[in-house]
Image (cartoon, coloured by chain):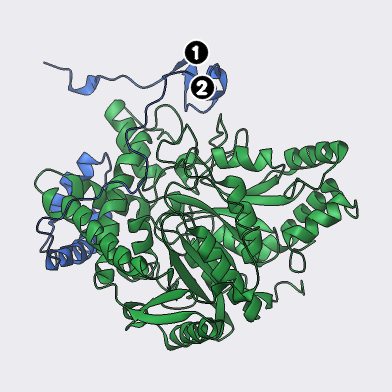
Amino acid sequence: MANRITREQVQHVAGLAKLEFTDAQLDAFTPQLDDIIGLFETLSEVDTTGVEATSSVSDQLNVMREDVADNWGQSEALLKNAPDAARGFIKVPAIIDESEDNE
Amino acid sequence: MNYFNQDLASLHADLVAKKVSAKELTQATLDNIKDTDTKIDAFLNLNEDAALAQAAKIDEAGISDDQPLAGIPVALKDNIVTKGLTTTAASKMLGDFNPVYDATVTEKLAAAQMITVGKTNLDEFAMGGSTENSAFKPTKNAWDQTKVPGGSSGGSAAAVASGQVPVALGSDTGGSIRQPASFNGIVGIKPTYGRVSRWGLIAFGSSLDQIGPLTHGVKDNATVLSAIAGHDDHDLTSSTQAVPDFAADLNDATSVNGLRIGLPKEYLADGVSDDVKTAILAAADTYRKLGATVDEVSLPHNKYGVAAYYIIASSEASSNLQRFDGIRYGYRAQDVQNLEDVYVKSRSEGFGDEVKRRIMLGTFSLSAGFYDAYFLKAAKVRTVIMNDFKAILKDHDFIMGPVAPTPAFGLGDEIKDPITMYMNDVLTIPVNLAGLPGLSLPAGFSNGLPVGMQLIGRPFDESTLYRAGYAFEQSTDFHTQLPTLGGQN
């Protein structure tokens, strides 16, 4: 099976992407990702010596504008979309993991 | 009310002459959608009350000759934000997301007084080619409800093809307007990158995404593109190029006389079905009869497009989708102990498998030790592919070929095999990589399913594509054939 990406690498990448997978999901994902990365590796057949990378095909370059607020004053509507909010603030669980705080 | 027998100009004439009011048209459209959508599941959400209120206001003010789109219903792919109207991107992550602003295209449609009747289904975050990746339901093909409608704008394509709406907007990152248009026998355009503002389009691959219209006919498509195109201060990649009145440019069938068309041999290669090849070769003959020259040309690096695209688009997606973290909006997992848990569990529960696959591929391609071999290599191959197109378009007015290698495939047939699904985009993806305009229009049938043709043009030369598409439409009857859906015909 996996020869281009290992199960451990998949888990590492998942950590970077803030995703987690069950063992069964890893069993399914690892060979799929391996196959797709195999497809990616066909690009090595293309000689790109001296070729510039393209990151944008827009005809606009370095457009500047004034930093002016518009469509503001909607904090109430914005907070309605927050999963949890109180008194004009978004509520989140404790940032510090208290279960580890035992030295 | 279905929209099989009237184009936008004729609807406009009826509205001006008060043969029908905007409110009657809107109500009849909503009624028909409710009747027919049980069969095709094109819509995620209807905008009933607001649409009827807007229509009543338009009727009160009256519709004049110079408002060609006023009072005409339109549907929007549900990755285009609409203020006050739930916008989900067909993801559990945004299941009850209520935007606080309108996309620029939404504003432009409202300024033209078009009436947004609802939001259409898509592959989650526009990632997929069959609309089966919707977190809510799969949409069905208008011609055969055992087939996929294509994707990711499958809901918009099926809605237009089944006569539910005369116009829908979609978005196209690697073929997501053109392929579903092809699978449903209608017209769709992926405009030049920068032609239409992406402000308010939920971002997938920011260097590739474009919004465009899906319609029954070429002229209607041209009319709507003129209405939604143009520079926007909110999208600094949007172009300052002037927007032509594309529909006014359309003349008669002789307008392709003397044009030079390139037909890349790679577009008729292995993997493209015989019926699709036959349709495209017949279309080439039609163009020759109309006075154009069709040359065999070559896009030698076309086959590397899919690999380059899935690295670039996935990398951009992995970056764009970082914002979905369960904090400010969107889905938040319930059983969480700390902040890290909010991020990881909300994302893992909120995203579907294909979205996770793309995030993983993108994060991998951008990660330390792999960036040069994957992302940077793909960005260089992108340049090579662009140069292939430039070489042909230097002495050809446009390129013609199929949209997809096959007609619509069966629901469930390919969803388990990502690479097979990705390869469906082999003929559309390179156009996004190069930022060129691509028009998809009906060009034949295979076992009762529509086959589409793709016309690819020079940057910002949608005019030539529309002219050539219109000339083809005037010379053939593919666009007049309609699906038999729920006894509508």
Q: Secondary structure at mark 2?
A: helix
* Residue B135, above or below B275: above
Left or right for B409, reference B220: left
Whether residue A29 is visible to the viewer of this picture, yes or no, is no
B45 or B218, nearer to the observer:
B218
Left or right for B294, reference B450: left
Q: Earlier in the sequence, mark 1 or mark 2?
A: 2
| Residue A42: x %, y % from top left | 17, 67
Q: Which residue is mark 1?
A: A88
Where is residue A26, by image quadrant? bottom left
Chain that bears disc 1: A
Q: Quarter of the image containing the C terminus of chain A?
A: top left
Left or right for A23, reference A85: left
B354 or B238, nearer to the observer:
B238
* Residue B315, above or below A85: below
* Residue B131, above or below B24: below
Q: Residue A79: which disc?
A: 2
Residue in view at x 11 percent, y 43 percent: B368
Task: Tell whether label 2 touches label 1 (CB within 8 Å).
Answer: yes
Residue in view at x 27 percent, y 30 percent: B340
Q: Amino acid at mark 1?
A: Gly
Residue furthest toward the front? B258
Left or right for B156, reference B27: left
* Residue B219, above or below B333: below
Q: Amino acid at mark 2?
A: Leu
Q: Residue B61: which disc?
A: none
Q: Colour of chain B?
A: green
| Residue B278: x %, y % from top left | 47, 88
Q: Are marks 1 and 2 on the same chain?
A: yes
Classed neighbour count for the residue bearing mark 1: other residues with Cα under 10 Å, few (<14), some (14–19), many (≥20): few
Q: Could you say which chain is coloured blue in the image? A: A
